[in-house]
Amino acid sequence: MRALREALILVALAALPAIGEGFYFRDKVSWQSPIPASELVTVDQAKAWGEGAIWVDARPDDEFAKDHVPGAFSLNEDRWNELLPQFLPNWSPDKKVIVYCSAASCNAARDVAKRLRNEAQLKDVFVLQGGWEEWVKTRR
Amino acid sequence: MKTSILTFTLSILLCAGVRAELKWGQQTIDLKPGIGDKTAVAHFKYENVGTTPVHFKSVKASCGCTATQSQKEVVNPKEKGEITATFTIGDRTGLQTKTVTVQTDDPNPAQATTILTLRTNIPTALEIRPTFVYWQQGEEPKLKKIFVKASKDFPAKNITVKSNNDLFTANVTAGSAPGEWNIEVAPKETTRAIGTSLTIQTDYPKDAPKSFYVNAQVTNPPSQNNPANTQVPPLLRRPNTPAGPIAPAMKRPTSPAPASSPAKAATPAAIPSPSTAH
């Protein structure tokens, strides 16, 4: 009984700094939900789609200019209104759209994919898992 | 038992005391840019409340759209300063969350990295749904509707719409409430891949009316032997349809696409710039 009471006291004491830490770092918690698995595509899957897929590079212009997936179209939110009309004539309803940004940690691909789905109401829009970083790894 | 509890408590207090060197005013800042603002700027203030100088090792934004600036490289004890994060809005809309990761030489790893968050809700002057309508080649060229609604802070009374391709018609009709409209758009033919960019112009502000864009397209027929079509029922495809030409790009880029962009190859003419974007 005594041992149980001591254990409970220690747990309570350990909980205090944990609560304090949680409160102190409350702003660091990411509230953004992860991308649903159904909206993600791996590099291998995307490659298997071949010409049935259209690639969209959501990274800034300078990164796109350095290098990009062959055949990809640049479509970022810095110049959305200019770039979207360049991309759409190359889209057709039977094509899947694969959007990528720099790495797994970036949000640009997710945001661009969301706008393509919600605003332009395109179907079959996917985000490339791991982004450009993952593509480069598989290219080696 | 008492000794162990005391030791445990003291060790926790000591750990907590070691890390409090660079103290941040706010680690999350909410900004409210106005309609048409180009940037949103956040000032993250800090103070070195410790006894030793703190060196910034790196200040990195999560997005190329956010530029950061730190006033100093070294922050001496009791010294204050700020890190400025300038978020370039571009053509973004809605809720945006950008982070800035600050790394210092603080010996406590938990304190060495701080993530600053900048949240903005970019107001939209006009809500337009959808921003893209299309017809497949051979499909009946029926009218398609686009719904437009002015936001509360944008008191536009009227809008006009203009197509940059005569092969499309576009007309505006009043919606069910003031500040709401419907745009009816249709191609004159669907025998080939064609496209247009519709420019929607508001009557507000009077001295500088704003322009918004919608795209309409007669798409290429589905391509044959398309591996991505495995989920599409065969009856919906037209396997004997020859592949059509790539549709002419809808006109409107302001700056040229990077040289390696395939979009450039598909864009025969360069194009007048949009005066304002949403």
Image (tube, grey):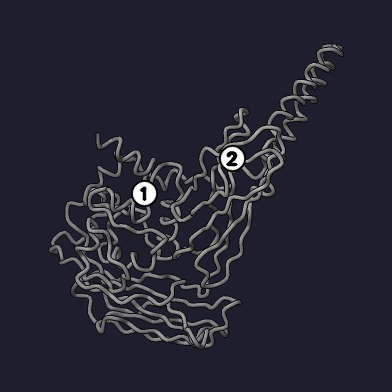
Classify 10 Å Cα crowding around label 2: few (below 14), some (14-19), many (20 and above): some
**Co-location on one chain, circles 1 and 2:** no
Chain hosting mark 1: A
Report the residue marked by disc 1: A100
State which mark lies toward you, 1 or 2: 2
**What residue type is disc 1 on?**
Tyr
**What residue type is disc 2 on?**
Val
Image coordinates of residue B227 in percent, x first then y, are 22, 48
> Is B158 left, or right, of B6 in this rendering?
left
Image coordinates of residue B52 in percent, x first then y, are 67, 32
* Secondary structure found at label 1: strand
Tell me the residue at 31%/57% (across/down): A74
Examine the image and state in which quarter residue B139 appears: bottom left
> Is B257 left, or right, of B160 in this rendering?
left
Classify 10 Å Cα crowding around label 1: few (below 14), some (14-19), many (20 and above): many
**Figure check: B11 above or below A135:** above
Q: Quadrant of the N terminus of chain A?
A: top right
Tell me the residue at 61%/42% (across/down): A29
